[in-house]
Image (spheres, rainbow, N blue to C red):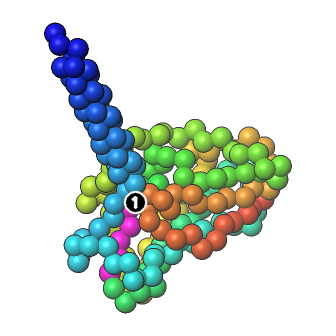
Amino acid sequence: MNPNIKASCLALSLVAFFLTACNMQRSANERSEPTYTDTVAGRLDHTAKPLETTLSIADTLFFGSAIPLKFVVRNPTDSLQRFCKWHTPFEPFLADYLIITDRDSTKVRYRGAMAKRMMPPPPEAYLEVAPRDSMSTTVDLTKAYAFDKPGTYHIVYQGQRISGLTVINDVTFALAER
């Protein structure tokens, strides 16, 4: 085979390889960022205020008992809003979406399920909140987190990248001996 033709074939093969690799990388990056659309208008309304999330828990609970955390989503707007229920208490524990630490900043071990999901979330993964309304749920943290001693604990919600919710607060509580 002519050396010039061989070199041209090799060069074209390398260019095709790099273009394919760049396109695959771009596609992988595009998949890693979730896309949210509004089911009512067919598009995301960037001018609307986001849905707000607040956490609440009793100041003192007893070691060995349930640890109920209340999770509230409030819609401060005049339009119907929606959020993805993945990585929220509005579905069973399928991800570690809370950072729970003790007084020494040691993270409480998550022992719940870890679901792998395809992006973007399907329409049934979204919940709607009416204008100027809210919805809430309470979850028992002992169902997914290993509290192994009494003490003071701090909770921060970290699922906002998937859910699309805005976090308003974090909470602290004491886990006391009976």
Question: Please, what is the dominant secondary structure of the magenta stretch?
Answer: strand
Residue at 53% x, 66% y: name it: 71
Position of 125 with respect to 114 (left or right) is left
Q: Is residue 71 visible?
A: yes
Placement of 22 over or under 56, stated as above or below: above
Foreground of the two, 96 or 68: 96
| Residue sitting nearer the eye, 69 or 45 | 45
Q: Quadrant of residue 57?
A: bottom right
Identity of the residue drawn at 54% across and 47% down: 96
Please tell me which residue is depicted at 54% across the width and 52% down the height of the picture.
97
Residue 81 painted magenta: yes
Was residue 86 drawn as part of the magenta stretch in this picture?
Answer: no
Taking 122 as reference, is 88 left or right?
A: right
Q: Which residues are magenta?
A: 80-84
Check the picture and name the quadrant holding the N terminus.
top left
At 51% from the left edge and 57% from the top edge, which residue is drawn?
A: 159
Residue 41 image point, x, y percent: 23, 77
The answer to which image quadrant residue 11 occupies is: top left
The type of residue carrying mark 1 is Lys
Q: Position of residue 135 (x, y in %)?
A: 44, 73
Tell which of 39 and 21 is nearer to you. Answer: 21
**Side (left or right) of 36 relative to 148:** left
Residue picked out by circle 1: 85
Extreme residue toward the bottom, this view:
78
**Image location of residue 83, percent across then percent down:** 38, 67
